[in-house]
Amino acid sequence: MKAGFGVVDITPRVGVQLYGFGPYLNRCGIAVRDRLEARAAAFESEGKCVVIVGCDLCVINDGIIAKARQIIRKAHPELEERDILVNASHTHSGPSLSVDYGGWGYPDPPYAILLPRRIARAACAALDALEDVEYSLGIVPCEHIGLNRVYDRDAPPLADVLKPDWTPAKPELTDTECRVLKFTRGDGTLAGFVVHFGCHPVVCCQQCRYIHGDYPAVAIHELMRQYPGAVGVFLQGAEGDVNSGCVHKPEPESMLALDVFAGRFANAVRRGLDTAKAVDDLTIRSCSKIAHFTPDELFTDEEMDRLYAENEALFDAPDATDSDGKLRMAAVNLVGLERMREIMRRGEQPGTSGEVHGVRLGPCAILGSPFETMQGIRREVDAAAKAPVPLVTSLCDGTLGYASDRECGKLDTRGAKYGAKMVPLINGRLPLKCIYDELAQALLDMDRELFG
């Protein structure tokens, strides 16, 4: 097998709006805590070549992905679109890039135009650096990072989670393992590595305004300093319902916790690198398709009118102010409802379609989609997959909100409603009727094509 790695700085200018944590917060970056990068890995075996790019970004819209692929394929016409996978780590301390998410931060146009060119540069650098490597795989415990925010308590006391032996109450509902793909040169030096793990990078939260890639990128940078010349690529796993143990804390506490959680993650990756075993299967394959997901026809014209009037009425109060969080959320709902109405006026159905993507690297199958996939779906796919090591990967090749598991939709809690109903409305889309079945099946279709 041959592998090559490339890295390009994608840090935005200070002052851009950062992504996430609430409507119309105008949360802007005040300084750079850690540079953001697009880190790429290219692989070739028996004439088949693929390239994977991991970006220290929250989400990347499909237009940016399409432009990056176009630039890559112009330089490397031997590649098909399915041979190029782009993943976002989901850091909430990076720039906003999606216009779909209403008031959750607005993109900086110069940065958005520049970004696909930088993603492509990282991919092309990896492709141009292909060299003979030995491929090995390490799978190690990683239980001190995340907790399930839907089925477990969120944001425990900081003093508890900073203890070295902290684990969540229900670790089985999180990602408990870190998968490390290691690529070594003939002289024994580390050429690069790919790490797969699922947990929201939200150690630093609403009150934090420093630009960085949160715990995954800080950990990767620590490891790259330890192994000069090596590049690490992070792939975000099933993180839809998993938060880091530290979340929603003030800036000083969050910045302290950032180094603690990054250190824990770096230690897990080190164990994976140290214990990795040589892989005999060097097969490389890729596949992708556009999947169509069934909308829940929850919003009739009458229901949309009712919701519109309900949200609009909040602005009629004499003491209404745009600093009120409820009014800001109501504004998001109004914008989403208008978007949905416009789609329906054109005679279209505001459902959801997106690319599902499979890449095989020997025994590992990267099974990617544009969703923030929940752990329940990951467990179902893992149980049924043919791949010895299935890697269910979120936020690949675009962003379409949450893929809730089958139990989440039944819960009457804010954590459950947020992913299943609120986020689709923000995006001007209908909720998805049975995404847990349809996405799992689409990912398993990719698995069977890779390992059929």
Image (tube, rainbow, N blue to C red):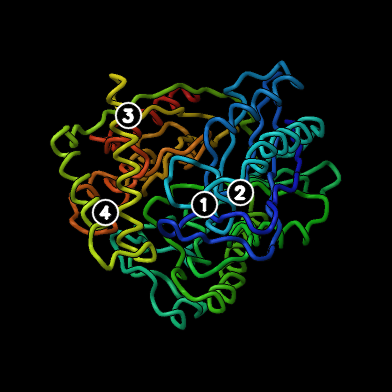
The residue depicted at 31 percent of the width and 29 percent of the height is 350
Q: Is residue 49 left or right of residue 103?
A: right
Q: Nearer the viewer, residue 198 or 396?
A: 396
Q: Position of residue 8 (x, y in %)?
A: 75, 44
Classify mark 3: helix, strand or loop: helix
Q: Which amino acid type corresponds to the residue marked 1 in the rendered image?
A: Phe
Q: Position of residue 278 (x, y in %)?
A: 66, 42
Tell me how far mark 2 sits from mark 3, CA to CA: 38 Å
Q: Which residue is mark 3?
A: 342
Q: Closer to the observer: label 3 or label 4?
A: 3
Q: Which residue is mark 4?
A: 416
Residue extending furthest toward the left:
302
Q: Earlier in the sequence, mark 1 or mark 2?
A: 1
Pointers 1 and 2 in contact (C-beta within 8 Å)? yes
The residue depicted at 31 percent of the width and 37 percent of the height is 338
Classify mark 1: helix, strand or loop: strand
Q: Which residue is mark 2?
A: 234
Q: Earlier in the sequence, mark 3 or mark 1?
A: 1
Does residue 220 lie above or below 70 as drawn?
A: below
Q: Which residue is mark 1?
A: 197
Q: Which amino acid type corresponds to the residue marked 4 in the rendered image?
A: Ala
Q: Quadrant of residue 225?
A: bottom right
Q: Position of residue 156 (x, y in %)?
A: 38, 75
Classify mark 4: helix, strand or loop: helix
Does residue 102 lie above or below 265 as drawn?
A: above
Which numbered marker is on residue 391? none
